[in-house]
């Protein structure tokens, strides 16, 4: 006997993990506007190297053995009728609905368009632009900005590459000064100009950029790795503004439910849990939501399992690749310190494959 109807809106890392875990016990429908899973971790390299153009796209067709994937855009959650309405007009009834629509990332870490062909064309366009540029500017010194700068430098050793960061140290949000210093040392050793305390904005002329001190930079191409925006505009348009905080994130309680709604959950980048918004954290939220959704669906009474509370993850291993064969790995250790490991660990853990074999296996495909 299956427990009930669960609609998971959003087929990113958290949504895929949750839908797969619920597939054996509930009637699961995963809703996503794309026909494939977008492995965003591989997207920065795909935007630079032609051989990686199609790597981020993994079909959904082997993910669920009993449930289904509905390709379409959710436009409304009808809490009165307990159904999700798609742009196609289809209505999906639910006993539990999960908002897992993630966040919008700057290019090239974005699925541009609505089809694989359109997204691949966008990657190819970035590749051509980078190949033809004399000077590429990357704005943002967090993990994505550092990784993208390294990928561009290795692909274009003859071009000028500048990384401008508004903070006083690279990777400062990770809390590891040593990791930031290592990233800066690698970049500068490979002739990437690193500008710190350099908040950038477009200049008055096309192709020019100005920092907070008034200094101008001329660049053929620029990429802005300066943050993400939660994909919740559709909720606001559907009349659920009260579910959102000032930054547009979905407000959740300690069980990852939308405040005041026992049958509505939100997991991953889309919610307002204060923690690093990275893939391992999204997976951890999906696992806790799985337990709480099952507890909710499996009846009431004194024998009903109690929900678990989510504990925000502020310290977790983090790998920042410098291309396919180097990088920096941060591992939390007791006492609040962070161990910083060298390139071999980063290469084995992430840099070489960007976790592509792992995600292919999660979606039912071979690692290759």
Image (cartoon, rainbow, N blue to C red):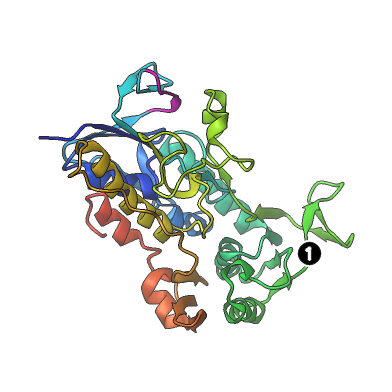
- Horizontally, is 103 left or right of 281 in the view? right
Q: Is residue 228 visible?
A: yes
Residue at image position (38%, 50%) is 13
Pick whichever, 121 or 222, lies toward us.
Answer: 222
Q: Is residue 77 magenta?
A: yes
Residue 169 position, x and y percent, is 69, 73
Q: Where on the picture, by quarter, is residue 51?
A: bottom left
22 to 354, vertically: above or below: above
For the magenta stretch, what is the residue range? 72-80
Residue 24 position, x and y percent, is 16, 43
Q: Is residue 169 magenta?
A: no
Q: Is residue 326 visible?
A: no
Residue at image position (52%, 45%) is 103
Quarter occupied by the C terminus = bottom left
Q: Residue furthest left?
A: 1
Quarter occupied by the N terminus = top left
Q: Which residue is mark 1?
A: 198
């Amino acid at each position: 006997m299956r427990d009930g109807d669960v609609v998971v809106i959003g087929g990113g890392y958290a949504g895929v993990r949750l839908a797969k875990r619920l597939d054996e016990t509930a009637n699961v429908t995963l809703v996503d506007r794309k026909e494939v899973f977008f492995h965003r971790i591989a997207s920065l390299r795909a935007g630079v190297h032609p051989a990686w153009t199609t790597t981020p796209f993994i079909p959904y067709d082997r993910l669920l053995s009993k449930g289904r994937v509905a390709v379409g855009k959710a436009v409304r959650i009808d809490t009165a009728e307990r159904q999700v309405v798609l742009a196609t007009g289809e209505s999906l009834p639910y006993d539990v609905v999960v908002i897992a629509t993630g966040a919008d990332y700057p290019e090239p870490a974005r699925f541009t368009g609505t089809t694989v062909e359109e997204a691949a064309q966008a990657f190819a366009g970035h590749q051509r632009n980078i190949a033809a540029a004399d000077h590429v500017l990357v704005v943002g010194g967090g993990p994505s900005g550092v990784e993208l700068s390294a990928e561009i430098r290795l692909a274009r050793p003859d071009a000028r590459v500048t990384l401008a960061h508004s903070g006083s140290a690279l990777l400062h949000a990770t809390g590891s000064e040593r990791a930031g210093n290592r990233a800066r040392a690698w970049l500068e050793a490979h002739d990437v100009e690193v500008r710190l305390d350099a908040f950038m904005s477009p200049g008055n002329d096309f192709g020019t950029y100005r920092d907070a001190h008034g200094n101008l930079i001329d660049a053929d191409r620029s990429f802005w790795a300066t943050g993400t925006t939660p994909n919740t505009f559709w909720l606001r348009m559907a009349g659920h503004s009260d579910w959102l905080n000032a930054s547009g994130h979905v407000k959740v309680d300690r069980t990852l439910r939308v405040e005041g709604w026992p049958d509505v959950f939100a997991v991953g980048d889309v919610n307002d849990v204060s923690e690093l918004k990275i893939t391992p954290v999204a997976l951890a939220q999906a696992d806790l939501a799985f337990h709480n959704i099952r507890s909710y669906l499996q009846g009431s009474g004194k024998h009903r399992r109690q929900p678990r509370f989510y504990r925000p993850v502020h310290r977790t291993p983090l790998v920042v690749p410098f291309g396919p064969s180097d990088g920096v790995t941060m591992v939390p250790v007791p006492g609040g310190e962070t161990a910083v490991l060298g390139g071999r660990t980063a290469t084995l853990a992430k840099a070489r494959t960007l976790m592509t074999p792992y995600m292919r296996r999660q979606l039912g495909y071979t690692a290759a």
